[in-house]
């Protein structure tokens, strides 16, 4: 018989049928199991679970409907708890930590964001190697790095996306996963999503293309146009991703759906199921937009990347074709800007600079750090210019082109840190 009880009634010997909580709050990453000792009871209570369902046919029933002795409840929730095979944390404690975060400027956050990017890469490579070896993913490190990404975004929501589009690992699948997750977490922050939703989105973004590891790598790296049969093989990656992610995260359908449905299109022309409109979950619709944006701005074996502002125009074209969600696409473009932070631009005066801040009410006129003067054929003392402000002289500065850093072999990060 399935019976609902309070967590304080839980005792060793009971069989939990359903923890009735989000998967990140579940201290065992399994939704049903036998409670073997008081330590397991304590983990349930200190993770903030108030009520749950037990199966009295598989385990001990409550005594006379009264509260049974429970493990001692600690006064404060620990931020982290180590369990076998999982790294679990209290969302209550995590949300309190986020509420106490002080915003930072881009320059202050970039050093930490760069270190986090390296950690993300290490974690993801370990995850990929685990999949290649045929083992099940341990979500511990992935959850931990996702928390850190959320924290970074609360301090400054432009640092991780900025690094994503100006720095690559040289490993296509790894770079794509890091870039997409960095853009998605900023997108989620822009939409005011809840911390647990943001973590779900980060994990789903990091793992969304993991099924590519089970696809013939010759096809993944093929420079020539794929045949219809080869294209069908490539498209199988979403099913492989779904299987891998579902096994790893268990009771977390949102994360699994992101892996499965990020190639569906709003008009129903996508794959694997051809669903469309709001039948596609919101997070999968968001991921589709970000995945397209990153794909066309990342160099591939069969084609060059386009610059970031051109990618925004491409997305708007896809809105017209009903392939992506119109409202979410406009939100994404407002989130990263027509000229995203970190983009190098040429101005009408011949000067060049790097976008360092958006003007939300005027996306075509961001704040630019001027670093180079084409007329003088050299670098100049950097100065910030707000293109939305009244011109300082008779000539009004406008952006005439973007993405010129390759021509001058400039790494924008170096100037953003200076």
Image (cartoon, grey):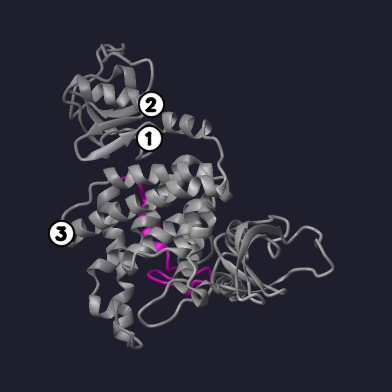
Please name whichever residue, 388 or 261, is drawn nearer the observer in this view of the structure: 388
The quadrant in which the N terminus is found is: top left
- Within 10 Å of disc 2 (Cα), the crowding (few <14, some 14-19, many 20+) is some
Secondary element at tag 3: loop
Residue pointed to by mark 2: 48
- Within 10 Å of disc 1 (Cα), the crowding (few <14, some 14-19, many 20+) is some
- Quarter-of-image position of residue 103: top right
Q: Position of residue 370 (x, y in %)?
A: 64, 63
* Left or right of 181 on screen, residue 355: right
Residue 302 vertical placement versus 122 (above, below): below
Q: Nearer the viewer, mark 2 or mark 3?
A: 3
Q: Nearer the viewer, mark 1 or mark 3?
A: 3
Please name whichever residue, 89 or 311, is drawn nearer the observer in this view of the structure: 311
Query: Mark 3 or mark 2, which is nearer the start of the sequence?
Result: 2
Q: Position of residue 71 (x, y in %)?
A: 26, 15
Residue name at image x 32 percent, y 15 percent: 73
In the rendered image, residue 31 lying in the magenta stretch gets the answer: no
Q: Position of residue 17 (x, y in %)?
A: 27, 33
Q: Which residues are the magenta region?
A: 250-274
Secondary element at tag 2: loop
Residue pointed to by mark 3: 134
Residue 3 vertical placement versus 364 (above, below): above
Residue 325 vertical placement versus 416 (above, below): below
Q: From mark 2 to mark 3, how far is it between C-alphas?
A: 34 Å
Residue name at image x 75 percent, y 68 percent: 397
Q: Does the CB distance between marks 2 and 3 fall below 8 Å?
A: no
Secondary element at tag 1: loop
Please name whichever residue, 197 or 184, is drawn nearer the observer in this view of the structure: 184
Residue pointed to by mark 1: 21
Q: From mark 1 to mark 3, how far is it between C-alphas?
A: 30 Å
Q: Does the CB distance between marks 2 and 1 fall below 8 Å?
A: yes
């Amino acid at each position: 018989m399935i019976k609902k009880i309070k967590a304080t009634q839980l005792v060793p010997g009971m069989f939990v049928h359903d923890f009735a909580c989000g998967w990140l709050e579940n201290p065992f990453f399994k939704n049903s199991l036998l409670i073997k000792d008081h330590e397991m009871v304590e983990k349930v209570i200190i993770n903030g679970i108030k009520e749950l369902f037990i199966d009295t046919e598989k385990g001990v029933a409550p005594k006379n409907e009264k509260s049974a002795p429970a493990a001692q409840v600690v006064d404060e929730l620990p931020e982290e708890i180590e369990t076998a095979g999982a790294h679990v944390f209290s969302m209550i404690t995590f949300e309190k930590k986020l509420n106490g975060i002080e915003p930072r400027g881009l320059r202050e956050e970039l050093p930490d964001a760069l270190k986090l990017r390296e950690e993300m890469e290490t974690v993801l490579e370990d995850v990929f190697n685990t999949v290649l070896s045929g083992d099940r993913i341990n979500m511990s490190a992935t959850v931990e790095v996702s928390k850190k990404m959320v924290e970074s975004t609360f301090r400054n929501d432009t640092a991780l996306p900025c690094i994503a589009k100006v720095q690559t690992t040289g490993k296509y699948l790894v770079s794509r996963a890091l870039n997409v997750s960095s853009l998605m977490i900023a997108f989620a922050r822009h939409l005011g999503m809840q911390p647990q939703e943001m973590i779900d989105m980060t994990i789903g973004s990091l793992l969304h293309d993991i099924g590519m590891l089970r696809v013939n790598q010759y096809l993944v790296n093929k420079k020539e146009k794929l045949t219809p049969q080869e294209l069908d093989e490539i498209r199988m990656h979403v099913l492989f991703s779904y299987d891998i992610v579902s096994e790893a995260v268990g009771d977390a359908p949102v994360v699994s759906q992101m892996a499965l449905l990020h190639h569906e299109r709003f008009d129903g022309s996508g794959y694997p199921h051809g669903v469309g409109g709001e039948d596609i979950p919101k997070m999968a619709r968001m991921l589709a937009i970000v995945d397209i944006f990153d794909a066309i701005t990342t160099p591939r074996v069969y084609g060059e990347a386009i610059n970031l502002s051109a990618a925004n125009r491409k997305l708007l074209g896809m809105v017209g074709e009903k392939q992506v969600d119109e409202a979410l696409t406009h939100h994404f473009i407002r989130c990263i800007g027509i000229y995203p932070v970190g983009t190098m631009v040429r101005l009408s005066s011949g000067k060049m600079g790097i976008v360092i801040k958006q003007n939300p009410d005027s996306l075509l006129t961001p704040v630019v750090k001027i670093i180079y003067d084409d007329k003088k054929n050299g670098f100049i003392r950097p100065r910030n210019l707000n293109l939305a402000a009244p011109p300082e002289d008779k000539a009004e500065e406008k952006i005439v082109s973007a993405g010129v850093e390759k021509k001058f072999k400039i790494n924008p990060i170096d100037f953003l840190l200076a």
